[in-house]
Image (spheres, coloured by chain):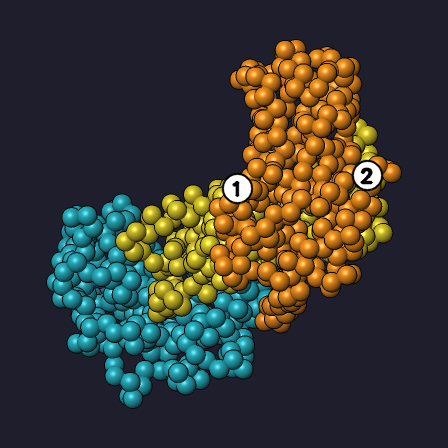
Amino acid sequence: MSSLSQPRLPQATTTPMLPLTLDGVRFSHRGQRLLGDIDLRLGAGRTLIMGPNGAGKSLLMRLCHGLLKPTTGQILWNDQALSPALALRQAMVFQRPVLLKRSAQANLTYVLAIRGCPRRLRKPRAQAALERFGLATLAQRPARVLSGGEQQRLALARAWLLAPDILFLDEPTSALDPAAIRAVEEAVNQFHHRGTKIVMTTHDLYQARRLADDVVFLNAGRLLEHSPAERFFATPQSSEAAAFVRGELPW
Amino acid sequence: MQRRHRLSILALSIALSAPLAADDERYITLASTTSTEQSGLFADIVPQFREATGIEVRVVAVGTGQAFEIARRGDADSLLVHDTQGEEQFVADGYASERLDVMYNDFVLIGPSDDPAGIADADDALDAFSRIAASGTPFTSRGDDSGTHRAEQRFWEDAGVDTDGGWYRELGSGMGPTLNTAAGMDAYVFADRATWLAFDNRQDLAILFEGDEALFNQYGSLLLDRERHPHLKHDLAEQWHQWLVSDQGQEAIAGYAIDGEQLFFPNAE
Amino acid sequence: MPIADNAFSTALTLIVTLDPALLNIVSLSLQVSLSAVLIAAMIGLPLGAALALWLFPGRGAVVVVLNAFMGLPPVVAGLMVYLMLSRAGPLGSLGLLFTPTAMVIAQVVLVLPIVAALTRQHIEALLAEYREQLASFGLGRPRMMPTLLWDARVALTTVVLAGFGRASAEVGAVLIVGGNIDGVTRVMTTAIALETNRGNLALALGLGLVLLLLVACVNGAAHLLGEHARRQMG
């Protein structure tokens, strides 16, 4: 994949992935409906998925990313079902970063290796990504002994090297202190400025106000609202969303 | 770095396994009994045979019953055991074409030196066995269907003794472990003299009865049947078989001694 | 304890004088057990990882059988290999009985279930942690395997060591398939058994101490390696 030689912007030569369309998507487990039915259409920009605990936010992201299969309904990327090739143009950062038991640098060269990057280019490119996310001095440290914030930035640096068109983030800052939260948000904006579509869940109303271009609001597995951020925070359409915005829904 | 490590491990293991593959075809596998091996006889006479013929003898020392089984399955080229009845049956069954007397040693009755059953002044071997049973002193038997075990059982039978009592301990072990056990529990034990002489852990045990001709322990060499197992090294095995009964072989056997005591007595005809 | 005192001085004498018979036995022991462990690891590590990764009908039965074989008595393993390699057995024409190769095969039978079963457990635990991330990278199961094996390397080193411990300590299997032939298939454990049978308890215990020392050295080296890796990689 020579396209990895430069961190890649969505290019005219590759077919666009957006919009992402969910058509009657439902997810049931052991006969119990956990999510759905969801009809949703996401374009470019930063989408924040919000809602109280158990609303189905993580579930929705895993379905979009292809880690789970919907029980019914379909998920289309620019009218295409998810193919292996399309899956490789996405990345996901988890709430608790899953880092390999290797050095910070080796965690980065690993993803370059599995994407077929030539050996001699791996270390310089990994080092550049470490620098971009303020981790350059930690290159040789075991990834597992880094602080929570450093680990999450390393996970973002790793995602950066995958040069995704879409980046999913599942509560990436939920366990971090304010300084680390700020660093992660800056990192998310770096992706945004590179043209990467952001889909992110959060509990943090202030974070959502800072980042969101549009908001998807879920409650109890149902989609209650999808609107531009400004309108969502100013005039929520549902009473649940209104209560949530006022900080009155348990989360 | 890691790659180099793995390469060196691979190289090491290949180097280690190389000698496993090296093989010298000029050898035979001999199935024999633990008593001959453990007495040190083979360590003494096999080098002499090798010098004379250039053939190595690899000894697999097991109980007589297992030695017969190994030969029956075609896993040994030659067989040297001490169970004349069994050997003759082996020839009669067509597994071997010839059986020759090679040598004998003798069995002895061993027990705690204070001799609670009083067998030291027994009239003959049968009397000694009867006295052990009558005294109720523990007796350890190999119980492993070896030549020694079979000989011991014939004595009990001839003496009319029922070995069901608690004094009779059947171990299912080789001669050495049985002697170890007897030494540990101050029991009587029936053993071949060669193993006893080479045995170190005697503690309070001593030979208490010996010399009765009924205690002679005859060894025979068997020439295995060529047609039943054509893959065996019959020509080399036949050289061994003939050497054992030759003057040179018989002298070698007679010459083996521990502490000046001769262990095996050649008696080929 | 005269025997014990005697054993220590016997062991010391054997080691200090580099007794050639002892060196021969030690080198054969290492060749046989290391070869067996190497082969068992080359089969058992991927096999265990595959059992952790793939769900297929009968997988439960395979796991139960592997776990049961972990406790297989060496004598039974030896007997099974003996019957296979015997001239009257299915692989008899290879003429491997009473050779070091036969001993390696018997020890592979003993060690492979340990390596495979314990590898499955470790990889399954690691997979629970890694699965979503690796799937997110777009990796299918075959490509997950090397990643999981490498990241579990510290635990798997211990697994392979456990296998080496079993291989180098057992006597039942190599005695049956090797025949304990002097200079050909006599290894530490069968030599110890033989000297015990001959009542040479001091020599037997001396050999036992040498064996203990060898196993301790191998384990110590692996432990240091593991600690090094732990410090390096967290």
SS type, badge 2: strand
Where residue B193 sits: x, y (%)?
Answer: 74, 33
Q: Residue at x 59, y 60 (%)?
A: B234
Disc 1 vs disc 2: which is toward the camera?
1
Image quadrant assignment for residue A216: bottom left
Colour of chain B as rendered: orange
Q: Which mark is residue B7?
A: none
In this image, C83 relative to C199: left or right?
Answer: left
Where residue C197 sits: x, y (%)?
Answer: 69, 37
In the picture, the quarter occupied by the N terminus of chain C is: top right
Colour of chain C as rendered: yellow
Residue annotated with mark 1 = B89
In the picture, the quarter occupied by the C terminus of chain C is: bottom right
SS type, badge 1: helix
Amino acid on which disc 2 is placed: Gln
Q: Badge 1 sits on which subunit?
A: B
Q: Badge 2 sits on which subunit?
A: B
Which one is earlier in the sequence, the residue at label 1 or at label 2?
A: 1
Asked if the residues shown at circle 1 and circle 2 are in contact, with their CB atoms under 8 angstroms apart, the answer is no
Residue C88 against residue B254 in the figure, above or below = below
Task: List the single residue furthest toward the front.
Answer: B269
Q: Residue at x 24, y 47 (%)?
A: A249
Residue annotated with mark 2 = B262
Colour of chain A as rendered: cyan
Q: Residue at x 16, y 66 (%)?
A: A74
The answer to whether one can see residue C26 in this image is no
